[in-house]
Amino acid sequence: MSIISDFDLVCERSGLSDLSQTMLNFGMAIGSSTLTLASDKYGRKPVSVLSHLVVLATGLGVAFSPNYTVLIVMRFLNGIVIQGTILSAVTYGVEMFPKEKRRFCGVFTFIVWSICMMTISPIAYLTRQYSWRIVYLSLTAISLYSLLQYWITDESIRWLVANNRLEETVKVIKKAAKMNGVNDNEPLKLIYKQELLSISEKQTDKLLAVTLDSGKEIMEETVVIHPEKYTILDIFKRKRLAVTLIIIWFTWFTNSLTYFGIYLSSSSLAGNIYLNFFLNALVEAPAALIYWFTIDSIGRKKTCIIFHVIATFGLISATILKVYANDNESVSTAATVFALIGKLGISGSFNVLFTYTPEIFPTNIRNIAFGTSCTSGRIAGMLAPFSSLLAVKIPWAPGAIFGVSCFFTTLSILYLPETMGKELPQTMDDLNKLYDK
């Protein structure tokens, strides 16, 4: 039983079939702009843990929805907290890894995402004779691990440092040192002498002696920090930074519209819909390999440009072939291949964005900027479900829109700074240094 038959979404109610997906993306847009603020204020860990628990609860609510109204409400709430899990995790990962190791975070996240997306297709195929509720319960079950997450996850050290939570910083470092069997003196020295001093040049109030359990003082004169608090308006006070944020917003909008639009319009491609969905997920794996070999060799900016060029080429080529297909099976198959090439490009560029965007903005505004960028993407995600309806009327139109958008995005990225090999900015002054040659 499908959602359409279960809630009688036919005839004059047929337009409601895509509404639940739009409400999910609307919820994601809200979550992107609110939970990221909470993450910057209260920490990565509490927002991540709470979001995962609510994802589990709302997922169960969707599966057991008694009517369509409850369904879309639960999907909306589910979308809000999904962003809390994704964005806090991405920011946490970027802040946890040193600059030379951040590609590990990106590539493994990318591969796991691809595997998860690929599993949706066989699950949907094997349960196609059963109720959609069984499928949803199967996918929701993975969130059960959130019941243990509180005891597994530690707070981001960079967030603790940026917010002057020195005692908690020491505890986390000591715990990590103990788990790795190393002396905690050295990492503590690194944190206090490099991280703290680097963000406090103009904020010296008094001296603080930090003492380990052994009684040995790490340093005699460590600065007590009163971290600067930023808002999104602080970015718009600087023309160059404002343009950067607007470009990032446009890039997220294009990527989200294209990425989800390709997935949701995959039924319009030649061949089996389950196979097409699986192949769309599968091409993300080679995109992860390209990301692995380029992100730290040629940089974030050039890698992002290359992926967008691939997306533009694939999508425009698929669009041209669809125009001249005329029910020719060979041409339709070729159009599907080029559409998959476009999917590879947009998937790779999306993964670069998840690494690139947090690296451009300072710690106390990182999640705000990241969240508003994702909000831009989710606005596009609300439009993406209608690409399948457009494909029914004009088969080549979605690909043309996606391809042209990717082309203009490629041009705009040329303005952005390179972040490869540079430490994450802690202050606005650090952010300006990204533009220095």
Image (cartoon, grey):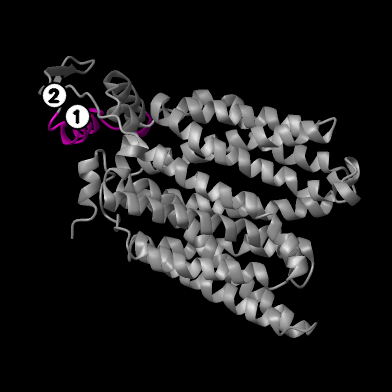
Q: Is residue 268 rendered to the left or right of residue 434?
A: right
Q: Position of residue 5 (x, y in %)?
A: 90, 45
Task: Count the marks.
Answer: 2
Q: Is residue 96 visible?
A: no
* Residue 262 against residue 426 in the figure, above or below: below
Task: Say which residue appears at 61% left-offset and 51% top-offset.
Answer: 381
Q: Is residue 360 visible?
A: yes
Specify the quadrant of the image occupied by residue 341: bottom right
Task: Say which residue appears at 38% left-offset and 63% top-offset.
Answer: 413
Q: Secondary structure at mark 2?
A: strand
Indicate the amino acid at tag 1: Tyr
Figure quadrant of the C terminus: bottom left
Task: Say which residue appears at 66% left-offset and 30% top-offset.
Answer: 56
* Residue 117 against residue 285 in the figure, above or below: above
Task: Say which residue appears at 70% left-offset and 56% top-offset.
Answer: 386
User: Along the line of sight, which residue is nearer the eye, 118 or 393?
Assistant: 393
Q: Secondary structure at mark 1?
A: helix
Q: Residues within 10 Å of mark 2 (few under 14, many from 20)?
A: some
Indicate the amino acid at tag 2: Thr
* Callouts 2 and 1 close, C-beta under 8 Å: yes
Q: Is residue 143 rendered to the left or right of residue 182?
A: right
Q: Residue 222 shows which numbered tag?
A: 2
Residue to which mark 1 is pinned: 192
Q: Residues within 10 Å of mark 1 (few under 14, many from 20)?
A: many
Q: Is residue 318 magenta?
A: no
Figure quadrant of the N terminus: top right
Q: Which residues are magenta?
A: 179-202
Q: Position of residue 130 (x, y in %)?
A: 89, 45
Specify the quadrant of the image occupied by residue 365: top left
Q: Position of residue 362 (x, y in %)?
A: 30, 40
